[in-house]
């Protein structure tokens, strides 16, 4: 158990340098020289078969199931059929043994037995052997007739047998240990003529000095070498000199300090839970493990559930942890945003930790997103400041901000700080006159400044609303933050070009309005930065632990465009009421993955039910009709049966129909989802879809 209350799931075993053991105390066993290891070795982990038959399938050891459920005979009917066949078999053997059917079944015995054996011990042995063969033939015949094997499997429990069988690893074809296609032997490097590098890496893995992050990172580096062969020499030198530590992340970290979930870096997946083995789920997915990867997270995910349902521990934390591991492997860049104190991972698991409002924070937040274009900065700020205010045109607000940001940057080669921007929006004479004096000779910028002065105080002027929102950041708690003079260490989302791990802590408790405004700003900046990347080989991801009052019309449209930019977002809400009513339907349409936790209201369930649509199902209507007998003997039998069972004799009329029904109704989502479960639908970036699945969630609560 770790200090933050989570259980550590270890990666494939890595080597540990033994430490000298201290002399044991008298009467105590000697102290182990190294920490215990758990899990498969790196070679076994690499060779384990992986297969997938749809989005969200945990590919590690997955065995595809049939598409449709086979017809299942009721257990009661199996028992009665087996009993009847057993009695029939015993009756037939009794008739044969007592000679009521003649002796024809003994003719083979008489035909192949010599006459001189009639009074010999061989005759006794041969006779009883024949009896055993006949009884065996009767048992096999009547056993098949009564379906005894199926009944035994049903009673013993075939599920336990399948689980025990699945626990035995089956090596994938062509990847046997030591074979030419063994991934632990780095065949791709050997094929390229880097046999020495492959031998070094194989020795590192065999000696326990390489873990799963090292393997994924070096394989990623090799993929870049294949794209640009000029890097091959540097790659070979790095592997020769550093072995498993080659091409390491800029932080120098080769693993996270703690893992709260199970990960498969070869498939870039994190295990989220298991699909319930029930009638509400498709037969092919029942009982299978469910995982998330960039292929489905690239379509973005919306999760809704009340407080205490485990959105942070069972969803956000595992996803952020998975993307952090991929960042160490050079495959992703992740930004996690949550309230101060949210359990999104320890500080050591991130490269940058921004604690807004905390004087001890090492990093600051760039209010302008790292851009140097005043118009772009003004658009992002307007979206964050007044994007949620009804009746205010965001475009007019962006124009008003651009009329101030452009002249200020032209005069001082930087953007204004929060106090300076507030003074300009409030039209403080001293600040305005100073800026006008420093713009001497720049007529275009002076015209912008004059236009802002003329619009100030007009009925539709967005300046007062902008000034009020800026005032939320011009507080003593934020003094020294959002600095633009070069004295701080601001973090900008332009860093998504690099495999970086970032956590932003917002002061939700004391400054809720400011936190929501900063969350809107981060989402707007992420949409812009992800789309503006020149190198989109890294998967960029933004995770919100609480996206309440964060979404605007423009950011929802931006989320929909992230799929083509190799990026995605994770948005969690307590209820859809935290989103403006006009945006609820567009939001559900903008994301490809939707998740409803247990305890959602019927109003939220209705929105999800509409988004998931309907399906054709087969229904059976059974009509019971009482049987009225005409014959006296039949009436007597019916009366005796009613006296014994307490029910009248009836016949059943079955009507089978195809009807269209909701996949999950609002009432089912509100009342039929057990605690610790969620209903999740997935869509991959390639357009593959997984119907809404009832999932039993793993992870920490």
Image: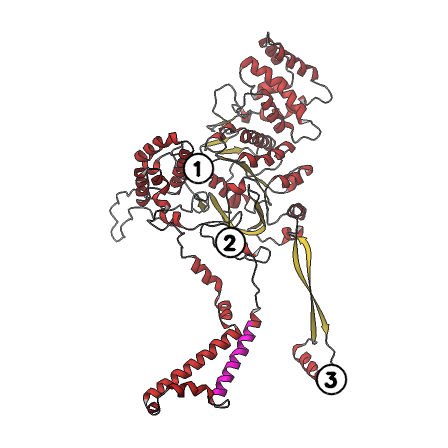
Label number found at residue 631? 3
Mark 2 lies on residue: 288
Magenta residues span 78-96
Q: Point out the tag, 2 or 3, that comes first from the N-terminus.
A: 2
Q: Is residue 175 above or below residue 442?
A: below
Q: Nearer the viewer, residue 207 or 466?
A: 207
SS assignment at label 1: helix
Query: Which marked residue is nearer to the observer: mark 2 or mark 1?
Result: 2
Q: Residue 298, located in which quarter of the rendered image?
A: top right
Query: Which marked residue is nearer to the observer: mark 3 or mark 1?
Result: 3
Q: Residue furthest front?
A: 111
Q: How is the image coloured?
A: secondary structure
At a point 50% along the width and 32% down the height, the residue shown is 536
Label number found at residue 349? 1
- Camera sees residue 38: no
- Camera sees residue 126: yes
């Amino acid at each position: 158990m770790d200090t933050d209350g989570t259980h550590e799931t270890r990666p494939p075993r890595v080597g540990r340098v033994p430490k000298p053991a201290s002399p044991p105390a008298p009467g105590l066993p000697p102290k182990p020289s190294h920490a215990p290891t758990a899990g498969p070795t790196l070679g076994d982990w690499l060779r384990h078969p992986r297969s997938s038959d749809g989005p969200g399938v945990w590919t590690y050891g997955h065995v595809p199931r049939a598409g449709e459920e086979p017809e299942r005979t009721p257990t009661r009917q199996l028992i009665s059929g087996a009993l009847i066949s057993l009695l029939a078999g015993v009756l037939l053997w009794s008739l044969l043994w007592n000679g009521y059917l003649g002796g024809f079944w003994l003719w083979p015995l008489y035909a192949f037995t010599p006459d001189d054996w009639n009074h010999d011990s061989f005759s006794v042995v041969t006779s009883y052997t024949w009896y055993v063969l006949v009884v065996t033939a009767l048992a096999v015949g009547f056993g098949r007739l009564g379906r005894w094997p199926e009944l035994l499997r049903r009673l013993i429990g075939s599920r336990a047998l399948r689980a025990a069988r699945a626990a035995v690893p089956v090596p994938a074809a062509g990847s046997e240990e030591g074979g030419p296609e063994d991934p632990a032997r780095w065949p791709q490097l050997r094929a390229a003529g880097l046999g020495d590098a492959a031998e070094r890496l194989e020795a590192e893995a065999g000696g326990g000095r390489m873990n799963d992050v090292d393997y994924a990172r070096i394989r990623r580096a090799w993929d870049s070498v294949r794209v640009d062969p000029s890097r091959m020499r540097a790659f070979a030198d790095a592997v020769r000199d550093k072995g498993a530590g080659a091409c390491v992340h800029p932080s120098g970290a080769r693993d996270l300090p703690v893992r709260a979930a199970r990960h498969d870096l070869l498939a870039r997946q994190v295990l989220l839970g298991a699909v319930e083995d029930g009638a509400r789920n498709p037969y092919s997915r029942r009982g299978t493990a469910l995982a998330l990867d960039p292929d489905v997270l690239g379509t973005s995910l919306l999760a809704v559930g009340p407080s205490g349902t485990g959105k942070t521990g069972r969803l956000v934390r595992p996803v952020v942890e998975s993307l952090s591991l991929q960042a160490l492997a050079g495959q992703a860049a992740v930004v996690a945003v949550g309230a101060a104190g949210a359990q999104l991972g320890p500080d050591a698991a991130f490269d940058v930790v921004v604690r807004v409002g905390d004087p001890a924070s090492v990093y600051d937040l760039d209010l302008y997103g790292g851009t140097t274009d005043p118009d772009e900065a003004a658009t992002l700020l307007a979206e964050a400041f007044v994007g949620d205010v009804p009746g205010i045109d965001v475009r007019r607000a962006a124009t008003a901000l651009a009329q101030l940001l452009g002249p200020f940057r032209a005069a001082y080669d930087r953007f204004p700080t929060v106090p300076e921007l507030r003074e300009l929006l409030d039209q403080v004479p001293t600040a305005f006159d100073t800026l006008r004096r420093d713009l001497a000779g720049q007529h275009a910028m002076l015209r912008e400044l004059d236009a802002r002065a003329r619009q100030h105080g007009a009925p539709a002027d967005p300046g007062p609303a902008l000034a009020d929102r800026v005032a939320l950041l011009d507080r003593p708690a934020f003094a020294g933050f959002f600095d633009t003079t070069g004295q701080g260490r601001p973090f900008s989302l332009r860093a998504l070009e690099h495999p970086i791990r970032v956590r932003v802590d917002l002061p939700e408790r004391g400054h809720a309005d400011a936190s929501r405004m900063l969350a809107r700003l981060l989402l707007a900046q992420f949409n812009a930065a992800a789309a503006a990347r020149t190198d989109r080989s890294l998967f960029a991801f933004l995770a919100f632990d609480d996206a309440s009052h964060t979404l605007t019309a423009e950011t929802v449209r931006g989320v929909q465009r992230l799929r083509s930019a190799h990026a995605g977002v994770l948005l969690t809400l307590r209820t859809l009421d935290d989103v403006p009513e006009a945006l609820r339907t567009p939001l559900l349409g903008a994301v490809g993955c939707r998740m409803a936790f247990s305890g959602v209201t019927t109003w939220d369930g209705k929105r999800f039910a509409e988004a998931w649509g309907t399906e054709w199902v087969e229904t059976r209507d059974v009509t019971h009709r009482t049987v009225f007998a005409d014959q006296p003997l039949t009436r007597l039998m019916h009366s005796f049966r009613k006296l014994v069972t307490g029910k009248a004799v009836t016949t059943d009329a079955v009507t089978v129909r195809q009807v269209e029904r909701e996949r999950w109704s609002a009432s089912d989502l509100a009342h039929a989802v057990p605690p610790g479960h969620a209903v999740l639908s997935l869509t991959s970036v390639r357009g593959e879809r997984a119907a809404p699945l009832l999932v039993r969630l793993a992870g920490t609560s």
